[in-house]
Image: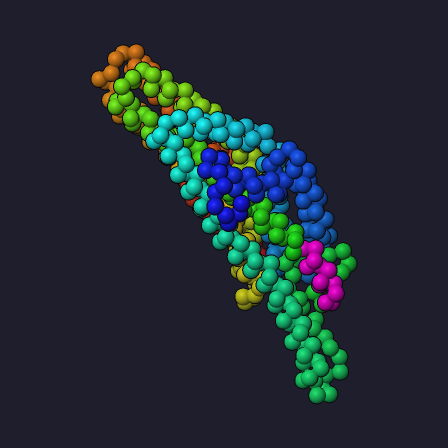
């Protein structure tokens, strides 16, 4: 299904659910997979990083930034895993509601076009991030083996009797993670390095897929909720043109309530992961910016940390952006109800419209825990707070 045409134009987020299924976050029979992924993360990343003896401040900050970043990835995915029932109910409710829309031609075409649109953009996003993933995985391996074979060539062909021993410790291999690995010496011994990358590369690939699965889950599901509100607004806008206003208004009330129920399920499913994301994001930003300021020159490690910085920024910006869109759509629906020409309608119709208008007054949006709405204003505050914390840490060094 990935990088392929949409097989079923009536399916709700089929590509996202396919990716979740591969990782073990969707489908009752596949959910045990993710527990093995968490165990693998603990063995290959968490334990080695916590038991590593760091020789300088730069490697310590780099390692902690990587640990918090990957911990946020798998911790957030685990929270999605625990909220599986809420998200499954959201998908089921959306499926039921879109099937209800297919009975009307204008709404049917709108939903089908949206399904094609979101499938196309999801594929484009996956293709774009795949380039970053390949660079992150391949760059340290390629540069390390280039260094190794260059040193080997110099030893056999360019020594001319002046070099008695062969030592590449002054140019160690590039590691994906700044850490020791169970007594191995992957920085200087080729066999140890080969064993290290055989374990860590698959782990980093799963990590990359997991973090972008989180981005797609939040963005796609919130975008779908926005589309449902937009359809309600279209029905409200067409209300004065209907022959049977009372029947149409009854339908609008029913559809609006079902849409609000869908959004409530989505908010419940996303609350924990968004709270974790906002808490960890400030720490990750601060650690990575601190690493950028104290490291010397540009290296493969510097670029890879830069990729992580870009990814965590996208991961934080995405829910804020789409959360703002969802809230804006809810406000536009409220304005549409108020501007539908209700003063010229009968009193019973006005009373029903008042019910819809009353429901639209409650704020709609995604939340981090139960503390705040996730929107662009919150993103701006987080950027300012992260920069302030970074300045304090920089002055403390």
Magenta stretch holds residue 31: no
Residue 72, quarter of picture: top right
User: Image height check: is 237 above or below 397?
Assistant: above
x 64%, y 33%: residue? 28
Is 303 drawn above or below residue 66 in the view shown?
below
Q: Residue furthest bottom?
A: 160
Seen from the viewer's position, the closer of residues 258 and 60 is 258
Q: How is the image coloured?
A: rainbow
The part of the chain drawn in magenta is: 189-200
- Vertical comparison of 125 with 270: above or below: below
The residue nearer to you, when weighing 191 against 119, is 119
Q: Residue at x 65, y 37 (%)?
A: 31
> Residue 336 vs residue 127: left or right?
left
Rendering coords of residue 221 (x, y %):
48, 36
Do we see residue 388 in this rendering? no
Instruction: Please state the horizontal and vertical placement of residue 325, each as a whole percent of the image.
Output: 39, 37
Viewer-proximal residue, 317 or 342? 342
Horizontal side of 119 relative to 31 (left or right) equals left
């Amino acid at each position: 299904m990935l990088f392929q045409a949409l097989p079923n134009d009536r399916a709700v987020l089929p590509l996202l659910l396919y990716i979740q299924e591969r990782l073990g976050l969707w489908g009752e029979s596949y959910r045990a997979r993710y527990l093995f992924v968490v165990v693998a993360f603990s063995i290959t990343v968490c334990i080695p990083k916590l038991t590593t003896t760091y020789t300088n401040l730069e490697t310590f900050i780099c390692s902690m930034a990587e640990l918090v970043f990957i911990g946020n990835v798998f911790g957030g995915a685990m929270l999605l895993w625990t909220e599986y029932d809420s998200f499954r109910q959201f998908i089921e409710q959306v499926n039921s509601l879109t099937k209800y829309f297919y009975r009307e031609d204008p709404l049917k075409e709108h939903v089908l076009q949206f399904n094609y649109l979101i499938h196309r953009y999801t594929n484009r996003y996956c293709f774009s991030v795949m380039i970053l993933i390949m660079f992150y995985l391949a760059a340290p391996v390629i540069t390390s083996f280039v260094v190794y074979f260059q040193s080997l060539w110099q030893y056999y062909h360019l020594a001319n009797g002046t070099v008695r021993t062969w030592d590449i410790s002054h140019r160690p291999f590039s590691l994906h993670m700044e850490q020791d690995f169970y007594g191995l010496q992957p920085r200087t011994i080729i066999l140890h390095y080969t064993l290290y990358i055989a374990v860590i590369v698959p782990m980093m690939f799963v990590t990359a897929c997991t973090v972008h699965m989180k981005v797609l889950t939040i963005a796609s599901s919130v975008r779908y909720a926005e589309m449902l509100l937009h359809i309600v607004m279209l029905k409200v806008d067409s209300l004065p043109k209907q022959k049977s206003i009372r029947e149409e208004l009854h339908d609008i009330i029913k559809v609006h309530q079902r849409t609000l129920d869908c959004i409530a399920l989505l908010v419940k499913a996303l609350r924990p992961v968004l709270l974790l994301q906002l808490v960890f994001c400030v720490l990750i930003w601060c650690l990575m910016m601190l690493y950028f300021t104290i490291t010397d020159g540009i290296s493969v490690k510097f670029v890879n940390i830069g990729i992580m910085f870009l990814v965590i920024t996208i991961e934080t910006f995405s829910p804020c952006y789409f959360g703002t869109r969802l809230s804006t759509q809810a406000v536009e629906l409220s304005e549409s109800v108020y501007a539908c020409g209700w003063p010229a309608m009968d009193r019973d119709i006005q009373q029903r419209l008042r019910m819809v208008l009353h429901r639209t007054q409650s704020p709609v949006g995604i939340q981090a825990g139960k503390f705040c709405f996730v929107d662009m204003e919150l993103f701006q505050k987080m950027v300012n707070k992260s920069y302030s914390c970074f300045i304090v840490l920089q002055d403390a060094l």
